[in-house]
Amino acid sequence: MLAVTARAHTNIALIKYWGKADSELMLPANSSVSMTLDQFYTETTVTFDADATADSFVLDGVRQDFLATTKITRFLDIVRALANTASFAHVESVNHVPTAAGLASSASAFAALALAASTAAGLNLTQQELTRLARRGSGSASRSINGGFVIWHRGHDDASSFAEPVQVNPNLNLRMLAVVLDHRQKRVSSRQGMAETVATSPYFPAWADAAEAASHAMVRALTGSDFAEIGAMVERSALMMHATTLAANPPFTYFQPETLATLQLVQDMRAKGLPVYATMDAGPNVKVLTTADAVLQVQDQLAAALNAPITVCAPGPDAQIIKEEEVDA
Ligand code: ADP
Ligand code: DP6
Ligand code: CO
């Protein structure tokens, strides 16, 4: 049997994806733009086994229960249909990122699984086809097939909802610091949180319109040299996304007190002249966008003020196959 291992890096959205237009095909309500991170990734090994009677899923060395394995099976069913095979698979994954803490583990996870599973099944998908496959596992995973900076086009059907790299002015030299205030798993998954928002938040339509326009504005801004313009758009997209959850019924938030304290700290550092902007995803942790020139000073000031691990990230690479080997059943 062929065991294929892929590595994919997480990505953090500069302009957020928050809400689906079609949850079966995983079409988003709006396009989104992200930076792939070099420091956080998932490695996943897939082995199709003609003798297996079900899929198995081991995460970080722990055999996963029926519910977690069912998510993998639903995704592998798409791969099996494409490859015209009925074989079950063994999936083994290791996260080099906190799982389900708002640091985009689902993005690196399903990008790695899409690449490993499609390769193990004998498919030879293009980068663009891989982004569409990864999307079916987790929307944000479509953006983790490519390194650097990426746009996921909203699209209107399976074929048109894909991700691709965008040009960035190398002089911008962007860096992202991840401030891990709480590495525990969130209570409300991204999937559930955005579904509740779409269903009940009167702010949702306004969000989707603004985010679509902001994605295209961000693609333009990334080719320019105005860091402050980019940063302001990044921070605003995050706060607009979180405003939609505060207006949901019942209202909810991913923020913790430390989240707002860190946002305030970033804004204070900015008022004193540092190029820093904050972004938050579906979790309490804060990511800080800055430039390579300022990153050490930003790291020092954050570390002095906060009791939290800080990881400095540069743009990360494409998802890739790191190992292929014949193994016994
Ligand atoms: P995050 O902010 O980490 O992306 P999500 O709520 O979007 O959080 O997704 C978390 C879910 O992603 C987990 O509950 C699990 O279903 C899935 N996941 C995370 N890591 C892996 C992995 N390595 N392999 C497969 N699925 C994973
Ligand atoms: C807040 O891609 O994790 O991180 O598509 O349901 O798996 P599913 O959700 P997911 O949502 C990510 C939401 C976000 C913003 C973003 O990454 O764009
Ligand atoms: Co996620």
Image (cartoon, rainbow, N blue to C red):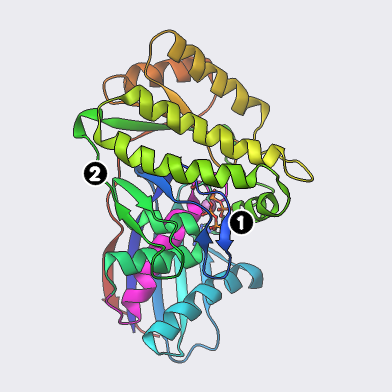
What numbered label is drawn on residue 57? Answer: none
Residue 218 magenta-highlighted: no
Q: Is residue 165 above or below residue 74?
A: above
Amino acid at the residue labelled 1: Arg
Answer whether residue 106 is visible to the viewer in this image. yes
| Dot placed on the residue nearer the N-terminal end, 2 or 1 | 2
Circle 2 SS class: loop
Q: Position of residue 258 (x, y in %)?
A: 62, 26
Answer whether residue 60 is visible to the viewer in this image. no
Which numbered disc, 2 or 1, marks the residue closer to the eye? Answer: 2
Q: Position of residue 74 (x, y in %)?
A: 55, 75
Q: Which residue is mark 1?
A: 191
Q: Position of residue 203 (x, y in %)?
A: 66, 42
Q: Which residue is mark 2?
A: 167
> Residue shown at 79%/45% (left/top)?
250
> Residue shown at 33%/64% (left/top)?
6
Label 1 environment density (alpha carbons within 10 Å; few <14, some 14–19, many ≥20): some
Q: Nearer the viewer, residue 95 or 251?
A: 251
Q: Is residue 134 above or below residue 283?
A: below
In the rendered structure, the answer to whether residue 107 lies left or right of residue 261 reads left
Q: CA distance from mark 2 to mark 1?
A: 29 Å
Q: In the figure, residue 153 lies in which quadrant?
A: bottom left
Residue 110 magenta-highlighted: yes
Residue at the far right: name it.
250
Q: Nearer the viewer, residue 10 or 140?
A: 140
The quadrant of the picture occupied by the N terminus is bottom left
Magenta highlight range: 98-124
> Residue shown at 36%/50% (left/top)?
151
In the rendered structure, the answer to whether residue 241 lies left or right of residue 160 reads right
In the rendered structure, the answer to whether residue 123 lies left or right of residue 29 reads left
